[in-house]
Amino acid sequence: MRALKTAIHLLPSLAVGIALGAVPSESPYSTPQPPFYGQVRTRTEYDIKGMADTTTKKALLNTQLRTRLGFVAVPNPAIEIKIEIQDVRFMGSETNAANNPASATVGNLKGLDLMQGYFAVEQGPFKTAIGRQKMSLGAGRFLSTLEWSPTSRAFDGWSGNLALGNGNLTGLAYLIRDTNTIVTGDNAILSGLYYSHQITPDIVAEAYGFYDESRLASAYGGVTAQAFDLLNYGERVAGKVGIFAFEEEFIWQGGEVSVGGKDKDNTAFQLATRLGIALGTHKANAGLDIMSGDDTPTDDDISTYRANYYFAHNLYGWMDYFASNPAFGVMDWRLDGDFGFLPGPNGNPRVSFKPQYHFFTPQAAPSGMDDAYGQEIDAEVHVAWFPKSNIVLGAGFFIPGDNAFRLPAASQASPGVPTARLANATASKETGFFLYFMPVFNF
């Protein structure tokens, strides 16, 4: 209830802001919703990006399989029901009987789960959905579906969307985690409002406010918190003027974090800037991304930005080193491009080349500890030769700096990496690299 009240209090501050004009993507409000759809995606990875194994020097090789099947029913024009089932597994990961590896072929780890399951009711310009649902806002810096992950991300709860001409308002209240124990009442709740506005056909802006409450222990940036109450206010403007493209987004994060039974003030931020050129199917950008850090962890203030629901891969490289924000924060000085070739029947390129360069430094670090984390060079080739398909070949290289050992071991992990391998996660300064092949077929 307190979370819902906070969301209501945020409304006046958002009503006067300008924001992004589109309906939230991958949400119950994005249209059209196909009556029947699915996806089969594999990703084969060759991974030694953890800089972790200093003894056997073994790399990690695995193939992930994601299979989706979804249905949308419309019993009458005002009601929509959606069910999406997802199966995720690593090839060859089935358990086997003792001394009989071949018995794994008759096993099943039950990787099947409910990805989405909700009903939505639409009355005039207002539509509301209750159940398990996807939600992605803006560029995904605060909240996204994390589609790169094999499992992706979905939320349990309620959301509503109101069409306002050139504007669009979305409200939500999600139960992130609940222990189901009435005595303790331990849970985590996310609620808030997101407003978007189409300023011109080429320029959009957004403003939002969210209350993120947790009564469960969580570790982040080297700090274990017993609870937190975080207020997040953000704004974003993005668009194009002639051949020039731009983007700016700022998120301020305030509130309190309980550490060791003591409440500490939370004053953190995230900033993103982009400036680029767009010429047809060719685009190039320069920019700076920042998540704030904390150079004095012993005081009564926590200034390490806590990114709980964002899309790390898209914003801070592709190699997982910043899946969680390090204690000293991160500044990502970056260059990226998207170059399309061989236009298809619809005018979209059949082949795209997407390079990136990142130079990572701490945002706030004590004197003598402010060396660079390192550099990352990434490249992807996307081939869309068949309808509703995207075949991706990718490579990433991370060149450690003198501060690379301060990156948290947890962010250097990949699914399937043995715990023992992470024990030496900060012991090597060798260049890490990551190769993958990811064909995606949809219907």
Image (spheres, rainbow, N blue to C red):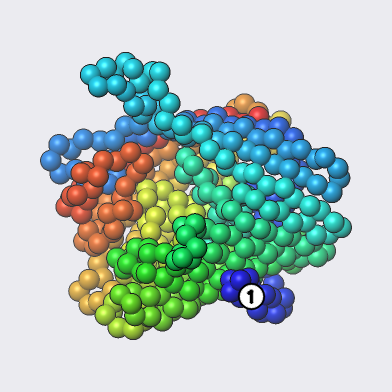
- 235 or 419, which is in the foreground? 419
Query: Farthest front residue?
Result: 183
Residue sitting at 38 percent across and 80 percent down?
A: 263
Which of the image's four quarters has the C terminus? top right
Residue 298 appears in which quarter of the rendering?
A: bottom left
In the rendered structure, which amino acid carries the disc numbered 1?
A: Lys
Report if residue 323 is visible in the image.
Answer: yes
Spot occupied by residue 69 in the image (x, y as percentages of width and height):
62, 32
Q: Is residue 288 above or below residue 47?
A: below
Report whether 202 appears left or right of 148.
right
User: What secondary structure is found at the residue carrying circle 1?
Assistant: helix
Report whether 34 appears left or right of 184.
right
Spot occupied by residue 179 in the image (x, y as percentages of width and height):
46, 57
Report whether 382 appears left or right of 370.
right
Spot occupied by residue 193 in the image (x, y as percentages of width and height):
65, 68
Report if residue 235 is visible in the image.
Answer: no
- 124 or 383, which is in the foreground? 124
Which of the image's four quarters has the N terminus? bottom right
Spot occupied by residue 63 in the image (x, y as percentages of width and height):
39, 30
- 443 or 431, which is in the foreground? 443
Q: Is residue 243 above or below residue 94?
A: below
Residue sitting at 21 percent across and 35 percent down?
A: 58
Reading the image, the residue beneath label 1 is 5
Residue sitting at 25 percent across and 62 percent down?
A: 406
